[in-house]
Every structure is written in structure tokens, then in C-alpha cells.
Image (cartoon, coloured by chain):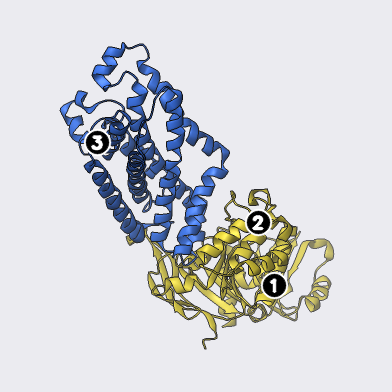
């Protein structure tokens, strides 16, 4: 079982880095977020930014949020690789070996989460280029990366659970997009949730992206850290991993 | 020890339910001896691929039982999958990987410990050793097919399933693949179950053949046994003038005459003996076209199903003709 997991996990990782186009997009996209979205408040007076975001550099506020939403995209991308494997018959090739459906799920979920972590150093490097100064302790770095890993595992599992039972390659993509947008905007990843209408605040208050963004922001902006957020994200990852595991074991279909 | 590589008993597979459902396999029974090359011959949609999907565990069984290498396909799926190899109709490899990396992944999926020696032996056998580190997207179609067979053989399976292995290949690659199938069977002693809708392929490669049509096995035997079912030759004739059927039916060796306008299908004991008699009986300038069909799997298939392989809509007249001949014989 370990051998099969390792084979499929390595395949997930290598496939991304062997495709120069995918690699380029993976690395450039977060940078574009910071460059374009981060510059959207370029001409706003600093005092206004201080009042709204608690910092005069919006990118400082934005970075933990964009890293969190990136984990959402990474999860969606992971499920697309499952659809691709089904379409091109590779899933059949895997299933005609003594590899269980659970192992396929775990290798895809953890492989896609690992891919997501690669974006962290790229984004942090880009943020430094945009004038963000990081003063995090090693423990804070570790906690931040762990939070993002939990988020990536949780979303990868969620999207894989959506993809597993489907033999149609369009529906999971549409469903994933449908899930992605509200999760991204009804969170404090891009703006403070205090400015949201009540119903959006309600969604944001249970949205794991919010917890990851707030935790990261507390490290970057030197605010008081709510360590319980890390526990919440660990529960989210474990819960989604369990759901995805059982859904895949029962309903993973190739035709 | 069980001498059978595959045993199938009253196996049915239904897709969907109710009136909209399709019965893809209808009470199929098969016993395939270890070490043989067994062919499933039938037109598109006959149920060949469905049978492979069911035996490899990709599709569920609706009714009946199936065993591969002594293990129950339903209850001992992982045991079955450790003992089978699969060669798809379309080549399925990881194009981002080299040939060697594809073998590495297959070894991981089969949970093999010491696989490198076997992998090198297979690459050498298939003349791929010097290209092992090239990405498979740079391989030719023939090389990709060979690598796929090497993957299927890596874990020393008892049975290899080959689903339409030569479909879409050019003539020379198809011939190369025929040699490979014969070769791996002799070299590695593996049982091969291949599906095909090419009669000459089944005839050239298989020890035994089952003819499958509309989900049912309608005949099974060695190629010679199947051909012996049609002992007569079929002479097809087109004349320029309307003939009296008696002119033909009274000729010695004629078993059956069927006319459709000026087109004639004559079933004869021996075409070699019949043709001189025919030319003596009717003026040769009245013969526009003549052809002789010797007993072949094609004629067996035609006689059993009423239609030719690859012919989507049965020709009603030919079906009636053969139905009448069957009735006449029985």
C-alpha cells in the first residue's frame, strides 16, 4: 500500500513540474495577484488604508489571504487531474493493479496539497519585492505553513470527493467553480469581514479560508494570534480527508 | 491445481435498469485454459470489451460468477488484479514520464520489490532498452504499444487482457504486434485473452476462439473446428441473363441455390469440382462476375449471425439465405 501511494504521489508532483507551462502558471499566478489586485489601492491615502486594513501596505494585508485562496485553486486543480486521468484511461490502468481507490484518493489529495505549498516561498518572495518586511519567528512560520497545508488538504479532499463519483468531465468543473467563488469572496482573504453585510459575515465566520487568512495576517502584521484557528483548520482537513476517503472508496468511478 | 486461467459461469452484465437498460452480456459461459491464446471475436458493441471490464474488475457483475487464476472476480478483486495485465485498445501511458519511469510506476502500483532486472529484460526483448530514458511522448506508435505490453508483463501475470490490440494500427505495426503476441505467449508462458473484430487476426493468433454477438457466445472452438462447421464453399455469381434455377440445382455437388434477380448464391460441396460443371452448363459470356468463398471464420460468422463482421445492419436476404440453409441441414 505504501509503495502504491508513493508511486502515485510522486507521479502527481512530477507531472506538475515536468510541464513547463503548468509550472510557470503555478508560480506566476500568485505573483500576478499581488501585482494587480495588490496595487488596486495604490492611490488611496495611507490613513484610509491604515483605518480599513490596519496597515498602509495593502499587500501586507492581502498576502495571507491570497495564499489561502491559492490553496482553494490548488484543490480544484488536483481534482482536474483526476478528471484527466479518467478521460485518458489512466485511471483504468491504475485500477487494473492491486491499488485501492482509497490509495488513489490519498495520493491525489496529498500530492495536490504538496503542490500548493510550492506557492508559499514564491509569494513570500514576491511580497518582499513589493516592500513587505517579514519578522516572523520560526514557530510562526511553521504554524502558518501548517495552516495552509491543512487548508490545501481540506480543499483538495473536498474537490476530489466531488469528482470521484462523476464520469462526466464537465460537471465536476462547474460544481468546483460554483463552490470556489462564494468561498473566496465570503472570507476575509481580500477585505476585512467587518465591512460585509450580516449574511456574508455569517458565511465568513465558518469559512476555513477566513481562519487561515486571519492566522497568517496575525503573524505578518504582528497582531495577537488566535492559535485555536490552527486547531479549527486541522479539524477541517481531517474532516474533509475522512469524507473524501470514504466517498472515493465507495463511489470512485471510471465509467 | 486449476488448469483454467479464466472460468465464467452464466455471467450477465446489464447497463442501466428497466426498459432503457442494455443487456451487454447475456449468460456467458467460458473456460480458458492456462497458457492458451484465446480470442473473442465479434463486431463492435457485441460485448467483448464489457467482458474484459468485468473480468478485470472495472465493471460490476450483474449476475453469474467469474474466476481469474482461481480467484473470484467479485470477492477477491485485489488478488485477481495482482495476476492480470492489461493492454488497452488505445495506448495508455504517462506521457510526461520516460519509458523507465512508466515501468517504475507500474512496479510501484504492483508493489514489486526487485523489478529492475525484469524490466531491463523486457525492454531488451522489445528492443526499447536504448530508449528507456526518453519521454514516451517521443516514442513511435509501435514503441508505445511495445512499452504498454512490457508494463502488462512486468509483474509476471497469469493472464494478459488485450482489448482490440491492433485497432487503428497500420499494416506493418499490426504484423509486428501479431509477432509479439505469439512471442510473449511462447517466451513468458502467459495466457492471452484478446478481443478482435479482425477475423484474420483471430485466425492467425488464437488457439481457441469464441464468437460473440449481441452479448451472447454463439460458438466456441479452435479455428479449424469452427471452420469445419461450414463444410461447403459459397459461389457467388452474377449473370447477364435470367436463368432457370434448375440449371444450377441439378449440377452434381450443389447443396443449395438462392437467387436474387441475376445474383446467385450457390452452396457447393467443392468449388473446384463445381466450376468446370458450371462453365459447361451455362455460356461463359452470360457470366458477368463470379467469386468463391472457401470455409473461413468469416463464413462461420456469417452463417451463425446472418451478418458479416463490421457490417452494422444485417443483410436480410443473406440472413434468410443462411437461415434456410441451416434449416435444410438440420
Numbered badge on residue B144: 2
At horizontal 63% and vertical 65% (from top left) the residue drawn is: B150
Give the structural element (helix, strand or loop) at label 2: helix
Look at the numbered discs 3 and 2 and tell me whether their residues touch, using CB distance below 8 Å. Answer: no
Discs 3/1, front: 3
Tell whether B105 sits left or right of B178: left
Numbered badge on residue A225: 3
Q: Is residue B5 above or below residue A132?
A: below
Tell whether B59 sits left or right of A222: right
Pinpoint residue A9: horizontal percent, then vertical percent.
47, 54
Q: Are marks 2 and 1 on the same chain?
A: yes
Which colour denotes chain B? yellow
Look at the numbered discs 3 and 1 and tell me whether their residues touch, using CB distance below 8 Å. Answer: no
Which colour denotes chain A? blue
Pick the residue in front: A25 or B77: A25
Residue at mark 3: chain: A
Tell whether B111 sits left or right of A131: right
Quadrant housing residue B243 = bottom right
Q: Is residue B209 above or below residue A10?
A: below
Give the structural element (helix, strand or loop) at label 3: loop
Pick the residue in front: B132 or B198: B132
Q: Residues within 10 Å of mark 1 (few under 14, many from 20)?
A: some
Quadrant housing residue A17 = top right
Discs 2/1, front: 2
Q: Is residue B159 above or below residue A239?
A: below
Amino acid at each position: 500500500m505504501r509503495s502504491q501511494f508513493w508511486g502515485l504521489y510522486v507521479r502527481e508532483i512530477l507531472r506538475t513540474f515536468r510541464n513547463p507551462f503548468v509550472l510557470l502558471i503555478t508560480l506566476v499566478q500568485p505573483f500576478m495577484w499581488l501585482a494587480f489586485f495588490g496595487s488596486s489601492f495604490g492611490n488611496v491615502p495611507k490613513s484610509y488604508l491604515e483605518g480599513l486594513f490596519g496597515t498602509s501596505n495593502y499587500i501586507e494585508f492581502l498576502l495571507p489571504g491570497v495564499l489561502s485562496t491559492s490553496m482553494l485553486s490548488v484543490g480544484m486543480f488536483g481534482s482536474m487531474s483526476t478528471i484527466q486521468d479518467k478521460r485518458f484511461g489512466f485511471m483504468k490502468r491504475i485500477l487494473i493493479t492491486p491499488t485501492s481507490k482509497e490509495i488513489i484518493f490519498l495520493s491525489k489529495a496529498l500530492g495536490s496539497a504538496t503542490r500548493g505549498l510550492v506557492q508559499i516561498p514564491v509569494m513570500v518572495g514576491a511580497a518582499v519585492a513589493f516592500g513587505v518586511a517579514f519578522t516572523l519567528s520560526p514557530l510562526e512560520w511553521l504554524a502558518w505553513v501548517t495552516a495552509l497545508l491543512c487548508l490545501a488538504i481540506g480543499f483538495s479532499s473536498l474537490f476530489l470527493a466531488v469528482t470521484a463519483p462523476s464520469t462526466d468531465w464537465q460537471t465536476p468543473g462547474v460544481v468546483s467553480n460554483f463552490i470556489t467563488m462564494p468561498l473566496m469572496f465570503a472570507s476575509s482573504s481580500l477585505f476585512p469581514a467587518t465591512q460585509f453585510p450580516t449574511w456574508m459575515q455569517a458565511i465568513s465566520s465558518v469559512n476555513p479560508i477566513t481562519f487561515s487568512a486571519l492566522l497568517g495576517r496575525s503573524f505578518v502584521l504582528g497582531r495577537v494570534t488566535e492559535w485555536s484557528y490552527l486547531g479549527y483548520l486541522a479539524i477541517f482537513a481531517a474532516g474533509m480527508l475522512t469524507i473524501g476517503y470514504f466517498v472515493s472508496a465507495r463511489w470512485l468511478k471510471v465509467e | 491445481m486449476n488448469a483454467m486461467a479464466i472460468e465464467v459461469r452464466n455471467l450477465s452484465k446489464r447497463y442501466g435498469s428497466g426498459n432503457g437498460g442494455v443487456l451487454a452480456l447475456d449468460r456467458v459461459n467460458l473456460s480458458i485454459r492456462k497458457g492458451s491464446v484465446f480470442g473473442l471475436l465479434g463486431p463492435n458493441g457485441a460485448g467483448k470489451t464489457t467482458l474484459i471490464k468485468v473480468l478485470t474488475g472495472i465493471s460490476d457483475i450483474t449476475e453469474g460468477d467469474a474466476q481469474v487464476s482461481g480467484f473470484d472476480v467479485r470477492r477477491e478483486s485485489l488478488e485477481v488484479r495482482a495476476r492480470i495485465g492489461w493492454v488497452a485498445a488505445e495506448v495508455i501511458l504517462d506521457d510526461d514520464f520516460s519509458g523507465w519511469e512508466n515501468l517504475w510506476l507500474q512496479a510501484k502500483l504492483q508493489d514489486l520489490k526487485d523489478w529492475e532486472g525484469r524490466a531491463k529484460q523486457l525492454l531488451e526483448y522489445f528492443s526499447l532498452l536504448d530508449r528507456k530514458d526518453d519521454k514516451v511522448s517521443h516514442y513511435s506508435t509501435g514503441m508505445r504499444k511495445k512499452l504498454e505490453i512490457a508494463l502488462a508483463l512486468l509483474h509476471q501475470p497469469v493472464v494478459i487482457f488485450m482489448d482490440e490490440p491492433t485497432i487503428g494500427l497500420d499494416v506493418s505495426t499490426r504484423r509486428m504486434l501479431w509477432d509479439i503476441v505469439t512471442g510473449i505467449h511462447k517466451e513468458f508462458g502467459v495466457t492471452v485473452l484478446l478481443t478482435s473484430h479482425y477475423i484474420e487476426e483471430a485466425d492467425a493468433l488464437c488457439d481457441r476462439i469464441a464468437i460473440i454477438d449481441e452479448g451472447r457466445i454463439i460458438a466456441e472452438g479452435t479455428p479449424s473446428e469452427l471452420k469445419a462447421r461450414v463444410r461447403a464453399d459459397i459461389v457467388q455469381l452474377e449473370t447477364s441473363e435470367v436463368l432457370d434455377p434448375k440449371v444450377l440445382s441439378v449440377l452434381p455437388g450443389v447443396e443449395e441455390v438462392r437467387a436474387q434477380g441475376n445474383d446467385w448464391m450457390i452452396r457447393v460441396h467443392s468449388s473446384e469440382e463445381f466450376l468446370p460443371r458450371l462453365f459447361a452448363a451455362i455460356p461463359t459470356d452470360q457470366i458477368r462476375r463470379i467469386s468463391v468463398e472457401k470455409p473461413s471464420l468469416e463464413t462461420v460468422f456469417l452463417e451463425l449471425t446472418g451478418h458479416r463482421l463490421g457490417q452494422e445492419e444485417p443483410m436480410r436476404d443473406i440472413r434468410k439465405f443462411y437461415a434456410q440453409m441451416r434449416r435444410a441441414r438440420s
